[in-house]
Image: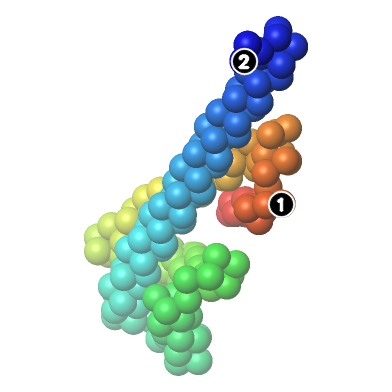
Amino acid sequence: MILDPLNLSIVAGLIILLLSNLALANSLFSLKKNIKQSWQTIINAFDTRTDLIPLLITTFTEYKKFDKKSLSSLIKSKNDSYIIKEVNKKFAIESKIDDFIDKIIEEGKRSKKLSADVDFLELIGLFEESKNEIRSLINSHNELTENYNHNLKSFYAILIRPIIGWRGVKTLPIK
């Protein structure tokens, strides 16, 4: 049986449509995997920053009294930070920890003795590096997320999205 040109065009069109859908699906799976890996990298950066907190507190308490209620709140947030992996909850806890660290650093900078302590100044530098790294990682994560969401809105993805159950991914706020 020989296909006439119209039927041949339809078959070719369907093959192209199928191949483009497969390529798009593969691209979306890869982007989704990269988004998860990028979130894990952000978690690792948060954890590295959180590991510095005991050094900051030890250095700080050598010069100034530390509010025990604030300290226990920070320790609880620090412990929660290691346990919770859900993006929004994790991000909220990390923001609380960030605010607390900023408060300690600002208070330390106002203390003449503490602001002259080399260890404290070095810790401030480490926290600033950590904050900049986290901000950069979040920017990269958001770029991946926006790319994923853009591809998800493409013509072909609209056709296959309901079948597979894909949803958009939220970007992270940057402090």
| x then y, percent, for residue 108 | 42, 69
| Count of marks, rendered view | 2
Counting from the top left corner in percent of width and height, residue 6 is at: 74, 11
Q: Kindly give the residue lying farthest to the top in the view shown.
A: 5
The nearer-to-camera label among 1 and 2 is 2
Q: Which residue is mark 2?
A: 1
Tell me the crowding category of disc 1: few under 14, some 14 to 19, or many 20 or more residues within 10 angstroms, Cα based.
Answer: few
Q: Label 2 is placed on what type of residue?
A: Met
- Residue at (71, 16) in percent of width and height: 7
Q: How is the image coloured?
A: rainbow
Q: Which mark is residue 50?
A: none
Looking at the rendered image, the quarter that the C terminus falls into is bottom right
Q: Kindly identify which residue carries mark 1.
A: 162
Q: Earlier in the sequence, mark 1 or mark 2?
A: 2
Residue displayed at 72% across by 40% down: 159
Horizontal relation, residue 34 to residue 120: left or right: right
